Amino acid sequence: MHCDAGTDEVSIDTATGDTPRVLHVTAMWPTADRPASGAFVQAMVRGLGKARGRHDVFLIRPEGGAGRRTSYLTAVTRLTRLLSSRKYDLVHAQYAHAGIVCALAARLPLVLHIHGEFGYRDYEPRVPRGLGERLLYFKDSLLARIASRLADATIVVNPHDLRHVRGRVRKCIPIGPDEGLFVPLDRAAACSELGWGKDSLKVLFAGESTERLEKGYPLFRSILDRLGALGVDVEEVIFRGYRHEEVPVLLNAVDLVILTSRTEASPTIVKEANFCNLPVVSTPVGDVEDQLDGISPGGVFPPDPDILAEAAADILRGRNRSNGREMALEKWSLRTTVSRLLETYSEVLANKRGGSA
Protein backbone atom coordinates (compact mmCIF):
# COMPACT_ATOMS: atom_id res chain seq x y z
CA MET A 1 0.00 0.00 0.00
CA HIS A 2 1.26 3.48 -0.77
CA CYS A 3 -0.05 7.00 -0.38
CA ASP A 4 1.32 10.19 -1.87
CA ALA A 5 0.78 13.08 0.53
CA GLY A 6 -1.63 15.64 -0.81
CA THR A 7 -3.20 13.36 -3.38
CA ASP A 8 -6.72 12.00 -3.47
CA GLU A 9 -5.93 8.31 -3.48
CA VAL A 10 -4.29 5.52 -1.59
CA SER A 11 -3.54 2.66 -3.98
CA ILE A 12 -3.61 -0.94 -2.86
CA ASP A 13 -0.79 -2.97 -4.38
CA THR A 14 -2.32 -6.39 -3.67
CA ALA A 15 -4.98 -6.50 -6.41
CA THR A 16 -5.63 -10.15 -7.27
CA GLY A 17 -8.02 -10.02 -10.19
CA ASP A 18 -10.01 -7.90 -12.60
CA THR A 19 -13.19 -7.76 -10.52
CA PRO A 20 -14.53 -6.25 -8.43
CA ARG A 21 -12.95 -2.83 -9.00
CA VAL A 22 -13.91 -0.89 -5.90
CA LEU A 23 -13.23 2.68 -4.84
CA HIS A 24 -13.44 3.09 -1.07
CA VAL A 25 -14.39 6.61 0.03
CA THR A 26 -13.57 7.67 3.58
CA ALA A 27 -12.67 10.63 5.75
CA MET A 28 -10.98 8.34 8.27
CA TRP A 29 -7.51 7.01 7.50
CA PRO A 30 -4.34 6.71 9.62
CA THR A 31 -2.00 9.71 9.54
CA ALA A 32 1.34 10.44 11.19
CA ASP A 33 -0.27 12.50 13.96
CA ARG A 34 -3.33 10.22 14.33
CA PRO A 35 -2.08 6.69 13.59
CA ALA A 36 -5.20 4.98 14.97
CA SER A 37 -7.74 7.09 13.07
CA GLY A 38 -9.55 4.83 10.64
CA ALA A 39 -7.12 1.95 11.19
CA PHE A 40 -10.05 -0.47 10.97
CA VAL A 41 -10.93 0.93 7.52
CA GLN A 42 -7.33 0.49 6.39
CA ALA A 43 -7.30 -3.09 7.67
CA MET A 44 -10.56 -3.81 5.83
CA VAL A 45 -9.24 -2.47 2.52
CA ARG A 46 -6.00 -4.39 2.87
CA GLY A 47 -7.90 -7.57 3.58
CA LEU A 48 -10.14 -7.06 0.55
CA GLY A 49 -7.15 -6.36 -1.68
CA LYS A 50 -5.49 -9.58 -0.61
CA ALA A 51 -8.66 -11.56 -1.29
CA ARG A 52 -9.99 -10.45 -4.66
CA GLY A 53 -10.30 -7.47 -6.95
CA ARG A 54 -8.76 -4.02 -7.11
CA HIS A 55 -9.34 -1.69 -4.19
CA ASP A 56 -8.36 1.98 -4.19
CA VAL A 57 -9.11 4.58 -1.53
CA PHE A 58 -10.33 8.14 -2.05
CA LEU A 59 -9.52 10.31 0.96
CA ILE A 60 -12.07 13.03 1.61
CA ARG A 61 -9.46 14.88 3.63
CA PRO A 62 -6.06 14.08 2.07
CA GLU A 63 -2.81 15.08 3.77
CA GLY A 64 -2.49 18.84 3.41
CA GLY A 65 -6.11 19.03 2.22
CA ALA A 66 -9.03 21.26 3.13
CA GLY A 67 -10.46 21.72 6.60
CA ARG A 68 -13.23 19.60 8.06
CA ARG A 69 -16.22 21.71 6.99
CA THR A 70 -15.15 22.46 3.42
CA SER A 71 -13.49 19.14 2.65
CA TYR A 72 -16.81 17.36 2.04
CA LEU A 73 -17.86 20.05 -0.44
CA THR A 74 -14.61 20.02 -2.37
CA ALA A 75 -14.58 16.20 -2.28
CA VAL A 76 -17.60 16.06 -4.60
CA THR A 77 -15.66 17.86 -7.35
CA ARG A 78 -12.48 15.88 -6.74
CA LEU A 79 -14.32 12.56 -6.72
CA THR A 80 -16.26 13.41 -9.90
CA ARG A 81 -12.98 14.25 -11.64
CA LEU A 82 -11.37 11.02 -10.48
CA LEU A 83 -14.27 8.84 -11.59
CA SER A 84 -14.26 10.44 -15.04
CA SER A 85 -10.70 9.18 -15.56
CA ARG A 86 -10.88 5.79 -13.77
CA LYS A 87 -13.26 2.89 -14.22
CA TYR A 88 -14.72 1.20 -11.14
CA ASP A 89 -17.55 -1.27 -10.66
CA LEU A 90 -18.82 0.32 -7.48
CA VAL A 91 -17.98 2.67 -4.62
CA HIS A 92 -17.95 1.72 -0.93
CA ALA A 93 -18.44 4.68 1.43
CA GLN A 94 -17.55 4.68 5.12
CA TYR A 95 -19.97 6.74 7.25
CA ALA A 96 -23.03 8.70 6.10
CA HIS A 97 -21.15 11.89 5.21
CA ALA A 98 -19.00 9.99 2.71
CA GLY A 99 -22.13 8.31 1.35
CA ILE A 100 -23.67 11.70 0.55
CA VAL A 101 -20.46 12.72 -1.27
CA CYS A 102 -20.57 9.52 -3.35
CA ALA A 103 -24.26 9.92 -4.20
CA LEU A 104 -23.60 13.45 -5.49
CA ALA A 105 -20.44 12.58 -7.41
CA ALA A 106 -20.88 9.05 -8.76
CA ARG A 107 -23.33 7.26 -11.01
CA LEU A 108 -22.08 3.92 -9.81
CA PRO A 109 -23.56 1.32 -7.48
CA LEU A 110 -23.09 2.62 -3.94
CA VAL A 111 -22.43 0.45 -0.89
CA LEU A 112 -22.80 2.48 2.30
CA HIS A 113 -21.23 1.42 5.61
CA ILE A 114 -22.89 3.02 8.66
CA HIS A 115 -20.97 3.02 11.96
CA GLY A 116 -23.64 4.03 14.44
CA GLU A 117 -24.90 7.26 12.91
CA PHE A 118 -28.52 6.07 13.09
CA GLY A 119 -28.22 6.60 16.82
CA TYR A 120 -25.59 5.07 19.03
CA ARG A 121 -26.84 2.46 21.44
CA ASP A 122 -26.47 3.91 24.94
CA TYR A 123 -26.72 2.15 28.24
CA GLU A 124 -29.77 2.92 30.31
CA PRO A 125 -30.69 5.09 32.07
CA ARG A 126 -29.65 7.60 29.41
CA VAL A 127 -27.25 10.27 30.52
CA PRO A 128 -28.77 13.73 29.92
CA ARG A 129 -27.22 15.50 26.93
CA GLY A 130 -26.67 19.16 26.21
CA LEU A 131 -28.43 20.86 23.31
CA GLY A 132 -25.31 20.86 21.13
CA GLU A 133 -24.75 17.13 21.60
CA ARG A 134 -28.39 16.32 20.86
CA LEU A 135 -28.31 18.41 17.67
CA LEU A 136 -25.15 16.62 16.54
CA TYR A 137 -26.77 13.23 17.02
CA PHE A 138 -29.90 14.39 15.19
CA LYS A 139 -27.82 15.66 12.26
CA ASP A 140 -25.84 12.40 11.98
CA SER A 141 -29.01 10.32 12.18
CA LEU A 142 -30.74 12.41 9.51
CA LEU A 143 -27.74 12.16 7.15
CA ALA A 144 -27.60 8.40 7.70
CA ARG A 145 -31.24 8.01 6.71
CA ILE A 146 -30.77 10.17 3.59
CA ALA A 147 -27.59 8.36 2.56
CA SER A 148 -29.19 4.97 3.12
CA ARG A 149 -32.04 5.83 0.76
CA LEU A 150 -29.53 6.86 -1.91
CA ALA A 151 -27.42 3.70 -1.57
CA ASP A 152 -27.83 0.40 -3.40
CA ALA A 153 -26.81 -1.46 -0.24
CA THR A 154 -26.53 -0.32 3.35
CA ILE A 155 -24.28 -2.11 5.82
CA VAL A 156 -24.46 -1.50 9.55
CA VAL A 157 -22.11 -2.72 12.26
CA ASN A 158 -24.77 -3.16 14.95
CA PRO A 159 -27.84 -5.35 14.30
CA HIS A 160 -30.05 -2.86 16.18
CA ASP A 161 -29.54 -0.40 13.29
CA LEU A 162 -31.07 -2.68 10.66
CA ARG A 163 -34.55 -1.44 11.58
CA HIS A 164 -33.64 1.98 10.18
CA VAL A 165 -32.52 0.69 6.77
CA ARG A 166 -34.72 0.52 3.69
CA GLY A 167 -33.86 -1.08 0.36
CA ARG A 168 -33.18 -4.44 -1.24
CA VAL A 169 -29.76 -5.09 0.32
CA ARG A 170 -29.42 -4.67 4.08
CA LYS A 171 -26.56 -6.27 6.00
CA CYS A 172 -24.96 -6.23 9.43
CA ILE A 173 -21.22 -6.61 8.86
CA PRO A 174 -18.92 -5.40 11.64
CA ILE A 175 -15.29 -4.87 10.60
CA GLY A 176 -13.26 -7.55 12.36
CA PRO A 177 -9.59 -7.52 13.33
CA ASP A 178 -6.85 -9.15 11.28
CA GLU A 179 -6.58 -12.56 12.92
CA GLY A 180 -2.97 -12.85 11.76
CA LEU A 181 -1.93 -9.57 13.39
CA PHE A 182 -3.92 -9.69 16.63
CA VAL A 183 -2.61 -12.84 18.29
CA PRO A 184 -1.68 -13.81 21.86
CA LEU A 185 1.96 -13.01 22.67
CA ASP A 186 4.21 -13.57 25.66
CA ARG A 187 3.36 -10.78 28.10
CA ALA A 188 6.91 -10.29 29.38
CA ALA A 189 8.20 -9.97 25.83
CA ALA A 190 5.44 -7.49 24.96
CA CYS A 191 6.26 -5.37 28.01
CA SER A 192 9.94 -5.45 27.09
CA GLU A 193 9.18 -4.30 23.53
CA LEU A 194 7.29 -1.30 24.92
CA GLY A 195 10.01 -0.55 27.48
CA TRP A 196 7.73 -1.38 30.42
CA GLY A 197 8.35 -3.34 33.57
CA LYS A 198 6.41 -6.59 33.68
CA ASP A 199 5.53 -6.68 37.39
CA SER A 200 2.94 -3.91 37.76
CA LEU A 201 -0.71 -4.38 36.83
CA LYS A 202 -1.71 -2.29 33.81
CA VAL A 203 -5.25 -1.31 32.84
CA LEU A 204 -6.07 0.15 29.43
CA PHE A 205 -8.59 2.95 28.94
CA ALA A 206 -10.35 2.06 25.69
CA GLY A 207 -10.33 5.53 24.16
CA GLU A 208 -7.83 7.82 22.46
CA SER A 209 -9.12 10.95 24.18
CA THR A 210 -9.86 11.49 27.85
CA GLU A 211 -11.72 14.69 26.90
CA ARG A 212 -14.52 13.13 24.84
CA LEU A 213 -17.44 12.84 27.24
CA GLU A 214 -18.95 9.85 25.46
CA LYS A 215 -15.84 7.76 26.24
CA GLY A 216 -16.52 8.01 29.97
CA TYR A 217 -13.04 8.78 31.31
CA PRO A 218 -14.38 10.13 34.67
CA LEU A 219 -16.03 6.73 35.24
CA PHE A 220 -12.75 5.02 34.34
CA ARG A 221 -10.87 7.13 36.90
CA SER A 222 -13.49 6.33 39.54
CA ILE A 223 -12.98 2.62 38.88
CA LEU A 224 -9.21 2.95 39.32
CA ASP A 225 -9.72 4.85 42.59
CA ARG A 226 -11.95 2.08 43.89
CA LEU A 227 -9.46 -0.56 42.78
CA GLY A 228 -6.88 1.21 44.94
CA ALA A 229 -9.30 1.11 47.88
CA LEU A 230 -9.71 -2.63 47.27
CA GLY A 231 -5.95 -3.07 47.54
CA VAL A 232 -5.39 -3.55 43.80
CA ASP A 233 -2.81 -1.02 42.60
CA VAL A 234 -2.76 -0.48 38.85
CA GLU A 235 -1.05 1.66 36.24
CA GLU A 236 -3.27 3.57 33.83
CA VAL A 237 -2.58 3.18 30.10
CA ILE A 238 -4.30 5.42 27.52
CA PHE A 239 -4.98 4.06 24.05
CA ARG A 240 -3.35 6.99 22.26
CA GLY A 241 -0.55 7.42 19.71
CA TYR A 242 -0.03 3.75 18.86
CA ARG A 243 0.31 2.68 15.24
CA HIS A 244 -2.02 -0.12 14.19
CA GLU A 245 0.88 -2.58 14.00
CA GLU A 246 1.83 -1.75 17.61
CA VAL A 247 -1.63 -2.31 19.09
CA PRO A 248 -1.29 -6.13 19.38
CA VAL A 249 1.86 -5.65 21.46
CA LEU A 250 0.04 -3.15 23.67
CA LEU A 251 -2.91 -5.50 24.18
CA ASN A 252 -0.59 -8.34 25.17
CA ALA A 253 1.32 -6.14 27.60
CA VAL A 254 -1.66 -4.87 29.63
CA ASP A 255 -3.73 -6.96 32.02
CA LEU A 256 -7.23 -5.64 31.35
CA VAL A 257 -9.26 -3.35 29.09
CA ILE A 258 -11.99 -1.30 30.75
CA LEU A 259 -14.53 0.18 28.31
CA THR A 260 -16.50 2.94 30.03
CA SER A 261 -18.14 4.48 26.97
CA ARG A 262 -21.61 5.99 27.17
CA THR A 263 -22.20 5.36 23.47
CA GLU A 264 -20.72 2.95 20.93
CA ALA A 265 -21.72 1.10 17.76
CA SER A 266 -19.32 -1.87 17.50
CA PRO A 267 -16.09 -0.99 19.33
CA THR A 268 -13.07 -2.43 17.52
CA ILE A 269 -10.89 -2.44 20.64
CA VAL A 270 -13.06 -5.16 22.22
CA LYS A 271 -12.69 -7.43 19.17
CA GLU A 272 -8.93 -6.84 19.09
CA ALA A 273 -8.64 -7.59 22.82
CA ASN A 274 -10.59 -10.81 22.37
CA PHE A 275 -8.23 -11.96 19.62
CA CYS A 276 -5.28 -11.38 21.99
CA ASN A 277 -7.06 -13.21 24.87
CA LEU A 278 -7.08 -9.97 26.86
CA PRO A 279 -9.98 -9.74 29.36
CA VAL A 280 -12.48 -6.90 28.89
CA VAL A 281 -14.78 -5.29 31.44
CA SER A 282 -17.35 -3.06 29.77
CA THR A 283 -20.44 -0.97 30.20
CA PRO A 284 -23.46 -2.24 28.17
CA VAL A 285 -23.04 -0.22 24.97
CA GLY A 286 -23.23 -1.04 21.26
CA ASP A 287 -22.84 -4.71 20.45
CA VAL A 288 -20.40 -5.41 23.30
CA GLU A 289 -22.75 -7.97 24.86
CA ASP A 290 -22.57 -9.94 21.60
CA GLN A 291 -18.81 -9.54 21.35
CA LEU A 292 -18.23 -10.81 24.90
CA ASP A 293 -20.84 -13.57 24.80
CA GLY A 294 -19.28 -16.76 26.19
CA ILE A 295 -15.93 -15.09 26.91
CA SER A 296 -14.40 -15.42 30.38
CA PRO A 297 -13.06 -13.78 32.43
CA GLY A 298 -14.62 -10.40 31.74
CA GLY A 299 -18.06 -9.28 30.69
CA VAL A 300 -20.62 -6.51 30.61
CA PHE A 301 -21.70 -4.75 33.80
CA PRO A 302 -23.89 -1.80 34.82
CA PRO A 303 -22.19 1.62 34.61
CA ASP A 304 -21.56 1.67 38.34
CA PRO A 305 -17.95 2.25 39.47
CA ASP A 306 -18.25 -0.09 42.45
CA ILE A 307 -19.62 -2.98 40.37
CA LEU A 308 -17.09 -2.44 37.59
CA ALA A 309 -14.22 -2.18 40.08
CA GLU A 310 -15.21 -5.44 41.77
CA ALA A 311 -15.31 -7.21 38.40
CA ALA A 312 -11.95 -5.74 37.43
CA ALA A 313 -10.39 -6.65 40.78
CA ASP A 314 -11.37 -10.33 40.44
CA ILE A 315 -9.61 -10.49 37.05
CA LEU A 316 -6.53 -8.52 38.07
CA ARG A 317 -5.89 -10.54 41.21
CA GLY A 318 -5.67 -13.71 39.17
CA ARG A 319 -3.94 -12.12 36.17
CA ASN A 320 -5.80 -14.57 33.98
CA ARG A 321 -6.15 -14.24 30.22
CA SER A 322 -9.47 -14.89 28.49
CA ASN A 323 -10.74 -17.47 26.02
CA GLY A 324 -11.62 -14.61 23.66
CA ARG A 325 -9.77 -15.77 20.57
CA GLU A 326 -11.30 -19.23 20.60
CA MET A 327 -14.81 -17.80 20.99
CA ALA A 328 -14.51 -14.86 18.56
CA LEU A 329 -12.44 -16.23 15.70
CA GLU A 330 -15.26 -17.48 13.48
CA LYS A 331 -17.72 -14.64 13.98
CA TRP A 332 -15.59 -11.50 14.28
CA SER A 333 -12.46 -12.04 12.15
CA LEU A 334 -11.34 -9.85 9.25
CA ARG A 335 -11.53 -12.96 7.07
CA THR A 336 -15.27 -13.19 7.81
CA THR A 337 -15.71 -9.46 7.14
CA VAL A 338 -13.96 -9.69 3.78
CA SER A 339 -15.98 -12.72 2.69
CA ARG A 340 -19.29 -11.07 3.53
CA LEU A 341 -18.32 -7.80 1.85
CA LEU A 342 -17.36 -9.57 -1.37
CA GLU A 343 -20.71 -11.38 -1.30
CA THR A 344 -22.45 -8.01 -0.87
CA TYR A 345 -20.56 -6.48 -3.81
CA SER A 346 -21.60 -9.43 -6.00
CA GLU A 347 -25.23 -9.10 -4.92
CA VAL A 348 -25.31 -5.37 -5.64
CA LEU A 349 -23.70 -5.78 -9.08
CA ALA A 350 -26.07 -8.63 -9.94
CA ASN A 351 -29.07 -6.45 -8.95
CA LYS A 352 -27.78 -3.66 -11.16
CA ARG A 353 -27.30 -5.97 -14.11
CA GLY A 354 -30.79 -7.39 -13.60
CA GLY A 355 -32.30 -3.92 -13.39
CA SER A 356 -30.66 -2.76 -16.60
CA ALA A 357 -31.51 -5.92 -18.57
Image (cartoon, grey):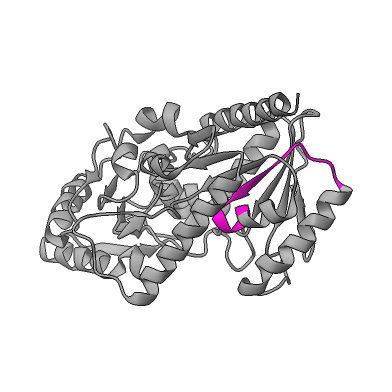
Asked whether residue 207 appears in the rendered view, the answer is yes
Quick one: which residue is furthest to the right in this view?
Answer: 85
Say which residue appears at 17% left-offset and 50% top-offset: 311
Give the side of residue 13 with respect to residue 181, left or right. Answer: right
Q: Nearer the viewer, residue 324 or 291?
A: 291
279 w.r.t. 129: above or below: above
Q: How many marks?
A: 0
User: Magenta residues, as a range?
Assistant: 86-99
Give the side of residue 72 with respect to residue 215, left or right. Answer: right
Residue 72 in the image: state x and y as whole percent. Answer: 66, 65
Residue 313 in the image: state x and y as whole percent. Answer: 17, 53
Residue 340 in the image: state x and y as whole percent. Answer: 55, 29
Give the side of residue 166 with respect to residue 316, left or right. Answer: right
Q: Nearer the viewer, residue 145 or 286?
A: 145
Asked if residue 87 lies in the magenta stretch, the reply is yes
Say which residue appears at 37% left-offset and 57% top-offset: 206
Q: Quadrant of residue 78?
A: bottom right
Residue 81 in the image: state x and y as whole percent. Answer: 84, 57
Asked whether residue 210 appears in the rendered view, the answer is no
50 w.r.t. 151: above or below: above
Image quarter hosting the C terminus: top right
Say which residue appears at 24% left-offset and 43% top-offset: 298
Give the side of residue 54 with respect to residue 221, left or right. Answer: right
Asked if residue 84 lies in the magenta stretch, the reply is no
